[in-house]
Amino acid sequence: MSGKIYVINPNSTESVTRSIEKAIESMRLVSGPEIECITLVGGPVTVQTQVDVDTLAYPLCNKVRELDKSAAAFVIACFSDPGMYSVREVTAKPVLGIAECGILTAMTFGHRIGVMSILSASIPRHLRYFGAMGLSARVVADRAIERGVLSLADAEATFQRMREVGLVLRDTDGANVIVMGCAGMASFRQRLEEALDVPVVDPTQAAVGMALGRVLRT
Amino acid sequence: MSGKIYVINPNSTESVTRSIEKAIESMRLVSGPEIECITLVGGPVTVQTQVDVDTLAYPLCNKVRELDKSAAAFVIACFSDPGMYSVREVTAKPVLGIAECGILTAMTFGHRIGVMSILSASIPRHLRYFGAMGLSARVVADRAIERGVLSLADAEATFQRMREVGLVLRDTDGANVIVMGCAGMASFRQRLEEALDVPVVDPTQAAVGMALGRVLRT
Amino acid sequence: MSGKIYVINPNSTESVTRSIEKAIESMRLVSGPEIECITLVGGPVTVQTQVDVDTLAYPLCNKVRELDKSAAAFVIACFSDPGMYSVREVTAKPVLGIAECGILTAMTFGHRIGVMSILSASIPRHLRYFGAMGLSARVVADRAIERGVLSLADAEATFQRMREVGLVLRDTDGANVIVMGCAGMASFRQRLEEALDVPVVDPTQAAVGMALGRVLRT
Amino acid sequence: MSGKIYVINPNSTESVTRSIEKAIESMRLVSGPEIECITLVGGPVTVQTQVDVDTLAYPLCNKVRELDKSAAAFVIACFSDPGMYSVREVTAKPVLGIAECGILTAMTFGHRIGVMSILSASIPRHLRYFGAMGLSARVVADRAIERGVLSLADAEATFQRMREVGLVLRDTDGANVIVMGCAGMASFRQRLEEALDVPVVDPTQAAVGMALGRVLRT
Amino acid sequence: MSGKIYVINPNSTESVTRSIEKAIESMRLVSGPEIECITLVGGPVTVQTQVDVDTLAYPLCNKVRELDKSAAAFVIACFSDPGMYSVREVTAKPVLGIAECGILTAMTFGHRIGVMSILSASIPRHLRYFGAMGLSARVVADRAIERGVLSLADAEATFQRMREVGLVLRDTDGANVIVMGCAGMASFRQRLEEALDVPVVDPTQAAVGMALGRVLRT
Amino acid sequence: MSGKIYVINPNSTESVTRSIEKAIESMRLVSGPEIECITLVGGPVTVQTQVDVDTLAYPLCNKVRELDKSAAAFVIACFSDPGMYSVREVTAKPVLGIAECGILTAMTFGHRIGVMSILSASIPRHLRYFGAMGLSARVVADRAIERGVLSLADAEATFQRMREVGLVLRDTDGANVIVMGCAGMASFRQRLEEALDVPVVDPTQAAVGMALGRVLRT
């Protein structure tokens, strides 16, 4: 249990990192592993395209190599899990992606998972990933709120849109658990859960939770 | 984060509970949730048949109702996840089964999961469960060591048998991660991992790890 | 062909047993196996929750042990197939569940199966079961009429609701065969089939039909 | 229940029809539907190729049209279910294929189905069919005895070969139920079941059993 | 590369063959394999039922035997791929079906495939076929325009209907590529693609394209 | 049909590019699209790790942007299809990967696909990709020859090893078509096909073949 859990926000938007900080605040334990949230300098402002995703692998590997000695585990805090399999090649420490952990954790909440994404252009990429993980049978729908990561700052409008999309996931698609498909949505989790009356999973919390388990086991 | 994580061993064999205690020892944090391992009085000596599994739902629900006020979460520490869906109906606290969490956690270690079970009679039950979870695509084989839970006490003979079966899972079935299909196998995890040179997941550690994440999030 | 086919209604509601009697009346042949419909004394009034389902395994096993000598086969007449795998362990006679047989029989009627359930709370349990059977690909939707088993007594209102849900299964979900997801719906089968113009399968008829085949073969 | 169940052997080999007669003998009930086994005049001596299968649709449809008035149901007694979907278009009576019913019935016996075929050239056709039915997840292997239908006449050699292949299905592939992939194997069912100690399903018995259920229901 | 690519329209409607001619016109290369489009004399006017499909295998095999010497490859230009597996038994030359190639080619355009069929009665047949090919996961919906092949002649009304159905496939079902489920729809491809703003695949072009690849490789 | 088909070998090993040249030689038609094979300067000597794959996306996108004006289509000639989805974002021209096209083309040759890879470390990556494409059901096994791309130069030893692995794919795994999982294996295709007596697909030929179809259609 020596070493920190590094939570790396691969986009360069500091406000997203701060929102991640808040989301995992309660997971910092006096006697537990230290958790440090980091913004990847030089990352794109937001991760939207496949190009964004693929080109993150290289700087993420570099960052992880740099932090490896002081690390207990790494969490890649972007819902496309950019570079995750590459990073697993450059470190022997646990490497967790928030999309993978978000879906896996949601499976313990409900049978039919709905994913709430930022932009619909990302959905085919998500679907390929769920297929790659062999989990497609559990994801009933992936719907986008169609607001960029940066416009999440307008909290009230964002929440109303999340609520609308959440109701469609729940009532039309039959989801009984919803995964937020972006690290930047964390601050809306509790309010959304109350509004929708189904569990809502913040994928970064899910990944940090699973990282804790990995780091603490003997 | 008030309340304990109760890890309930549904069979009445105290030695299994003690082995679970050891396995999760490192997950007890001074400032984290208390973890208490409990033997279900009146449970079967070992859980082998479907009758064993089905008849555990009722006493497990009773036990959970009794503990609910002081609980933060429950872990059902038997690889058939007996009564898990029932228990979820009688408490609002997180309820995690070690089979579910063992498989989900293994997915973050490797693509092709091998399961090492106690007795081959349990394998169709496991396969139905993997199918129910929609995860069959990731489990490449489930093979039994064909030694009862109680004979696990003969540690050396048991380990040799686990090693043999592990090599078949790895080399014939192509597994690149192995899940131990019994709460009572925990003490062999590290030694088996070294012998096989692939990650070996103790499902109880996996479940307690995921329970920590659930309890600590806000 | 010696011995009876016992059709066990695991809930304690006699009116459901009588409706089952009617549904399988035409399957009693002078020269064929005797069919006896039984109400499980002590069962819940209706089977709605997972707790209901799991706690039925024990009394069902006891009942089957008691009847075993005089039995040719057993049919468990509740759409959650409670205790089916347990019961198969305590008798060497064929044991058929109406959900399993209802879906399997529906596959010979049409490619896209719609399931009409009583309450939506049962649907995740059904979906897990279809997954366990490896049949999810054929079930296009499972929709609930949201009326308790007991309110089925109000026949006209129930039929209108079944018709509404059936039209959604047929026209929105594209089902070309519908399985009634409850033993107590049998009396509506023919009328519903006419109203919807797609085959409607009563799962108890399906199971008793398959039981006949099992009992009569050499 | 007026009308006969016609069991049509689509190959022109009378000995296969006679073996079918024997297999379903115990399913003829004094008070039940009459069952008549028919050889399709003009069919191929054995059905081996896809050409054999496809070219049977037309004469089968003609035969069914001719028998329709006196029919309660039709069973197509060849494991490729030749023409089954076509025949369903030319009659409103139930039409069952022995492959479909053999697999569906096997699902009620065990979780992992092994298929024992005549010739390996048929296996890709079988696999396509299992996929078309959405049932591939339950069929663990399809292995051929590599003896033509006609050489089944040499009973002892055939049985020894079936036993060998059955042991591979059971012990290597993990099948816990075996479906005989040919109408002409019926006479070996009981002996094979004893030799292998797993249930063995004769698909023609399975189909006639399901036909009885279809014909007798109201 | 000696020999022609024969594109066989298995229905006897010459106007469909001419529309195919136009669709593949640009694939005829001076130095490439000759492509000849043929109408199967004696085929049904349109291929709608399973009987139509099954009874085409025999004349198609005959035609292929007749043309085999001068052939480099065969394309069966009907979206049910009638007789394809049979034809593959009677010639050693490549045999491609337009449904198979249409779906495979669509996979290189988009993740979620929508199929636009002529009549809804064909849809269960298509779904069985997608299942047989193991490709069901990629086909999100198959919807019919409900206009017979012959009424395609009324181009404007047909196009409007195709546009309507295409919008449902795109916006309700989430398709991001559409496959036209009939050889006779070719002339609408470009216009439909523009109207829907998603790629539209003409399956005959797809199959002739793949045939070129097969014929030209060494 | 203006513009070239660019076949880009993303590793920097010229001998692989030359072997690709040979493999697609017969696909160059006087009147067809020009095909140009290119070595990506600065690519890794061989593509083995996920890091190799992920870091190729960026230079491949750059190369494609540079060539876009003169391009009719792009083929990425590495069996991990590095950067394929990224490249599709930076050009409107068809972009085909050899793994995708190799598997899709193999589906028209046989039902059970075996993949012959270079190194076993790549197999989990391949399996994730087959899952992402939704095609896992058709790939029965992926086995490595465990010789680096560069040692392919020792042709005789390489061929013997390919033959050995091919026999296991065919006889143990039941593959009836084999896809060579590397652009550098092309020169062995015909000899291997003869030795194994099942079709062997060179994925680069498959991709260039499909590219021809894409470029030639109107």
Image (cartoon, coloured by chain):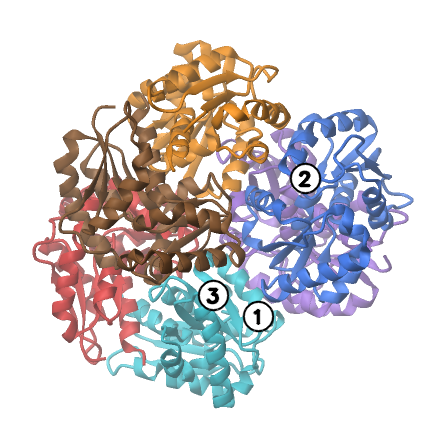
Chain colours: A red, B cyan, C purple, D blue, E orange, F brown
Q: Is residue F58 left or right of residue C77?
A: left
Residue occupying the point 51% across, 68% down: B142
Quarter assignment of residue C190: top right
* Quadrant in which the N terminus of chain C appears: bottom right
Quarter assignment of residue C177: top right
Could you tell me if the residues under marks 3 and 2 are in contact, i.e. CB atoms within 8 Å? Answer: no
Q: Where is residue F95 in the image (x, y as percent from the top left)?
A: 26, 37
Which-is-in-front pick, marks 2 and 1? 2
In the depicted view, which residue is nearer to us: D72 or D59? D59
Quarter assignment of residue A210: bottom left
Which residue is denoted by mark 3 in the rendering? Answer: B173
Q: Are marks 2 and 1 on the same chain?
A: no
The disc label shown at residue D81, or none: 2
Label 2 crowd (10 A; few <14 / some 14-19 / many >=20): many
Residue D218 appears in view: no
- Label 3 lies in what chain? B
- Label 2 lies in what chain? D
Label 3 crowd (10 A; few <14 / some 14-19 / many >=20): some
Q: Is residue D55 left or right of residue F94?
A: right
> Amino acid under label 2?
Asp
SS at mark 3? loop
> Amino acid under label 1?
Ser
Q: Position of residue D106 (x, y in %)?
A: 67, 54
The residue lying furthest to the front in this view is F156
Vertical arrangement, residue D19 with respect to residue A87, above or below: above
Q: In this view, does F112 lie to the left or right of F27?
A: right
Which residue is denoted by mark 1 in the rendering? Answer: B122
Residue C146 appears in view: yes
Could you tell me if the residues under marks 3 and 1 are in contact, i.e. CB atoms within 8 Å? Answer: no
